[in-house]
Image (cartoon, helix red, strand yellow):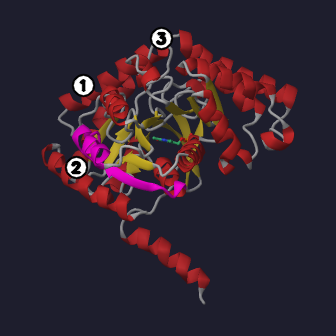
């Protein structure tokens, strides 16, 4: 068997569909965020990054960096092993206390990434529930879909944020059956928000557990940075809140918070937690410092919202196809994978602006886009430079300026996505 050609064919397939991924070679510069050095073809130059998930620039916060360095100096670089074998480094104990306090929950458990936290927690919780039925939003993140699959239990996909569809599925299920509703608060590609309170009401009515992914909201929403549930006073209506330390908190790692018994069960039964080396103490210390800062400081959140709104306003005023978004995420519709890639390349080559193309399967076909994430550090001058660059690229490549066709495309493609998720296991 020609093993090598099988893999080459798989990669060629992506090339032919115009969705082969190329990662930019970047070096972030502390003190100059969102500027970074871009290396390509033997040359290096500074560019502006407009698609970082270090939403608040906390990755360059001097106290966060100091905490990281100090802990590494005192405790070393690695954790030294799994928590089961090597015990828990003290900074991780502190981090978990900080997180349960952030969300007002009894306990928290930290994983090596947000991806692992979803995969390990959803699969373990659903597996421990007798004859569990999982109800999953069709636009849930890949890590949640993997958790659902790995649980091996039955699942039903509900149309995105569609309460009627969710209720229909809940009503049809055996009332005595355990049920788990899994969804996100902020959906990161469209920037829309789930009807959390109404979903919690349905969960109460039909006796379901709730699991929410607040990855794109923690640090950024709520007076303490506890996410949309914090902002809307809904944390006690949701059983499990999951988040990441890697986006707005500027560090690395993922976590769940919730009732002590659930957290203890995941700690005791999830292979993805038990059999892997813990987060390094320095990273835990950095995350704790970042969380503590954002629990009291409103500055980053206010400036973040202000600059995100300004970005939307300026781009809309210029006639660019900004897709509707309720949050800090600013998606601009391109609607074609090859054009999307070319737009991204031209922004980088001609304008020194880095915005990664977002293509299928991350978003439905026909809704390919540039996803812009303004931060408190994207000042007005950078916003205006972005506008001018986008207009030049849109003109040169002949990309459509309206989102009018997009609405129908989005709706019809959600149905396609629904089928994809269903058939995907
Ligand atoms: C990024 C992301 C994750 C994974 O978090 P990491 O800490 O980056 O592994 C989980 N859920 C959603 C919705 C995400 O966008």
Mark 1 lies on residue: 313
Q: Are the residues tagged 2 and 3 within 8 Å (C-beta)?
A: no
Residue 163 is a magenta residue: yes
Measured in 3D between alpha carbons, the distance from the residue under mark 3 to the one under mark 1, in whole angstroms, is 23 Å
The magenta stretch is 151-172
Give the number of the disc on residue 298.
3
- Please give left or right for residue 284 compared with residue 291 in the image: right
Label 2 element class:
helix
Q: Residue furthest left?
A: 404
Residue 107 percent coordinates (x, y): 63, 26
Give the number of the disc on residue 72.
none
Q: Residues within 10 Å of mark 2 (few under 14, many from 20)?
A: some
Residue at left 55%, top 76%?
Answer: 7
- The reply to whether residue 281 is visible in this rendering is yes
Relative depth, front residue between 154 and 248: 154
Q: Are the residues tagged 1 and 2 within 8 Å (C-beta)?
A: no
Residue at left 37%, top 18%?
Answer: 232
Residue at left 46%, top 52%?
Answer: 145
Residue 303 against residue 397 in the figure, above or below: above
Residue at left 45%, top 24%?
Answer: 227
Q: How crowded is mark 1: few (under 14 residues within 10 Å), some or many (20 or more)?
A: few
> In the rendered structure, which disc, 3 or 1, sits on the residue that comes first in sequence?
3
Please identify, in this view, whether the residue under mark 1 or under mark 2 is nearer the observer.
2
Quarter of the C terminus within the rendering: bottom left
């Amino acid at each position: 068997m020609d093993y090598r050609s099988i893999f080459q064919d798989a990669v060629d397939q992506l090339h032919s569909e115009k969705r082969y991924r190329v990662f930019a070679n970047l070096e972030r510069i502390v003190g100059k965020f969102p500027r970074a050095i871009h290396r390509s073809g033997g040359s290096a130059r500074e560019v502006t990054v407009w698609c970082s998930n270090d939403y608040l620039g906390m990755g360059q916060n001097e106290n966060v960096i100091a905490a990281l360095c100090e802990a590494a100096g005192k405790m070393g670089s690695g954790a030294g092993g799994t928590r089961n074998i090597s015990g828990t480094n003290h900074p991780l104990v502190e981090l978990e206390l900080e997180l349960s306090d952030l969300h007002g929950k009894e306990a928290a458990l930290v994983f090596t990434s947000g991806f692992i936290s979803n995969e390990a927690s959803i699969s373990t919780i659903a597996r421990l529930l007798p004859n569990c039925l999982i109800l999953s939003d069709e636009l849930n993140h890949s890590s949640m879909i993997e958790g659902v699959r790995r649980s091996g239990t039955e699942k039903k996909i509900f149309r995105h944020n569609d309460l009627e569809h969710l209720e229909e599925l809940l009503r049809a299920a055996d009332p005595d059956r355990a049920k788990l509703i899994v969804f996100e608060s902020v959906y990161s590609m469209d920037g829309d928000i789930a009807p959390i309170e109404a979903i919690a009401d349905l969960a109460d009515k039909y006796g379901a557990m709730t699991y929410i992914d607040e990855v794109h909201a923690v640090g950024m929403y709520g007076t303490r940075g506890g996410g949309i549930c914090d902002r809307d006073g809904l944390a006690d209506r949701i059983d499990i809140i999951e988040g990441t330390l890697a986006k707005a908190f500027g560090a690395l790692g993922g976590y769940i918070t919730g009732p002590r018994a659930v957290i203890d069960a995941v700690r005791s039964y999830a292979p993805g937690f038990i059999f892997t080396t813990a987060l390094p103490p320095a990273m835990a210390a950095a995350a704790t410092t970042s969380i503590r800062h954002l629990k009291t400081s409103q500055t980053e959140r206010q400036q973040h919202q202000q600059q995100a709104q300004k970005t939307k306003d300026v781009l809309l005023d210029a006639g660019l196809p900004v897709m509707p978004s309720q949050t800090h995420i600013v998606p601009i519709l391109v609607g074609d994978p090859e054009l999307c890639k070319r737009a991204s390349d031209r922004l980088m080559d001609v304008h020194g602006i880095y915005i990664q193309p977002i293509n299928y399967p991350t978003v439905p076909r026909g809704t390919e886009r540039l996803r812009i994430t303004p931060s408190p550090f994207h000042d007005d001058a950078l916003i205006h430079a972005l506008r001018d660059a986008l207009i030049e690229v849109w003109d040169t490549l002949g990309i459509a300026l309206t989102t009018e066709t997009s609405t129908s495309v989005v709706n019809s493609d959600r149905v396609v996505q629904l089928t994809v998720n269903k058939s995907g296991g």
